[in-house]
Image (cartoon, helix red, strand yellow):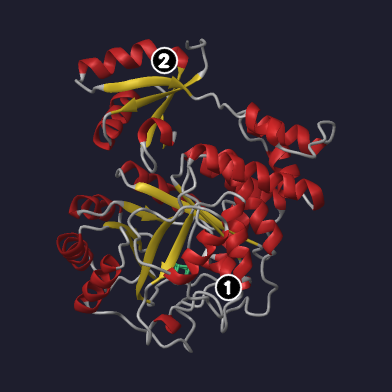
Amino acid sequence: MVISGETLYIICKNLTDVFRAEKVLSEAGISVRTVPSPPKEAGPCSTVLEISGNDLEKSETLLKQCFIETVKVIPARAERTALLERLTGFDRSSAFSAALSRIMEGSPPTLPDLRVLLEAAGEDRQILWKAADNIRQACIGDVVDIRAALEFSNHCRRNCLYCGLRRENRKLARYRMTETEILDQALKIKEMGIRTIILQSGEDTWFTTERIVSLIQGIKKETGMRITLSLGEREPEEYIIFKEAGADNYLLKVETTDPALYKALHPDMSVVDRMEHVRMIKKARYITGSGNIIGLPGQDIDSIARDIIWCWQEGIHMIGIGPFIPAPNTPLEAHTPGAVGLTLNAIAVTRLVCRNAFIPSTTALATLDRKAQMQGLACGANTVMLIMTPPGVREKYMIYGNKMMVDLEWALTMINSLGRKRPSYITGAF
Ligand code: SF4
């Protein structure tokens, strides 16, 4: 039964219908968002439409008129109370437990609640992590998704203060892999059983529209893998062209949603543009990834809380949260790294808020502390990214210092140690 005014999910047959429906409804003035789907309803990494119950009748009529078939409509209300009951040591009188209860029961995330949760320490922290792990298990299941990143160029036109690839880092030896080298490596990744390749680079305009299209089409033809692009900001029309060429996902981290902090760290960029690019990517019908960095100089807890709320508001499908790590030969090389505990809290809070999103336990976490990457998987994360850039160039993709080269053996070690499930497509013995 639908309660008047409550938030609803409309589930369509496929992604094409979801995006067609979004267009029809928004053009009719109905407030609609595409958000990650509850996996039991539509499968992981899929997308549903979120509307207000008040608009249901009008929406259904419009969709019928446009021959868009809907599978069903379900309330978005979370069934989290039972999960809350399972938490041991839960003192219901504290500000922490009040905030946790509200978030777990499906209240919209607020700045005060997220602040309290992000600051959790001691026993509260253990409860927070356990709660996020419970939500992860209930909403996403036990499988840890494994993806492979191929960092094919370390040239970058930008000058982000924290990044070793910034254009003013003259000490970094630059490289670009050839199309043949990229395809050969993609085939190796496919042979490992991996189903998603992440094509990652700095903002390298040498890789023109045509060159990227050629890469996408070549990889699709030779491997059939899903392709995630992580190329930075491109021209608006390129997002559409790359999607039509066969790209599936696009990853563009916002890094921080704090306008002043963003400006200080990205001298020639704007956070408004950055957010607009993420929206363009989502509008171009990609499964959309974003995320932030924890521990940036000048960042505070409220700033991190706002990043998480932004991911929730935008319905981001994949959310990468990694600690800041100083990169050699950058203005921030002497700055203290982000704290592991706060990063893990941010992963946990993000899982509680954006419960169906793909959340990686990042390479950056592993770089600070190998065990922390495992802990990330135990407090809400469900994805690991392997670094599959070939030796000889991978050392030069130095976005930060001493990057840990996460490989399949380590990913499976973590999965086994945690009693989680490897994806069915990985069959090799380790
Ligand atoms: S963070 Fe991205 S855009 Fe900025 S310098 Fe590094 S690679 Fe370039």
Residues packed near mark 1 inside 10 Å, few (<14), some (14 to 19) or many (20 plus): many
* Amino acid carrying mark 1 in the image: Thr
Label 1 to label 2: alpha-carbon separation:
48 Å
Front one among 245 and 354: 354
* Amino acid carrying mark 2 in the image: Asp
Location of mark 1 (residue)? 367
Where residue 333 appears, as percent x and y from the top left, is: 63, 79
Element type at marker 2?
A: helix
* Side of 129 relative to 316 (left or right): right
Disc 1 CB within 8 Å of nearest ligand 1 atom: no
Front one among 418 and 282: 418
Front one among 59 and 224: 224
Residues packed near mark 2 inside 10 Å, few (<14), some (14 to 19) or many (20 plus): some
Where residue 365 appears, as percent x and y from the top left, is: 59, 66
Task: Tell me whether circle 1 and circle 2 mark residues in contact (CB < 8 Å).
Answer: no
Point 43% across, 45% down: residue? 317
- Where is residue 154, by image quadrant? bottom left
Where residue 401 appears, as percent x and y from the top left, is: 56, 79
Sequence-wise first label, 1 or 2? 2
Which mark is nearer the camera, 1 or 2?
Answer: 1
Q: Is residue 119 visible?
A: no
Location of mark 2 (residue)? 55
Image vertical order of residue 138 relative to residue 56, above or below: below
Point 37% across, 76% down: residue? 389
Element type at marker 1?
A: helix
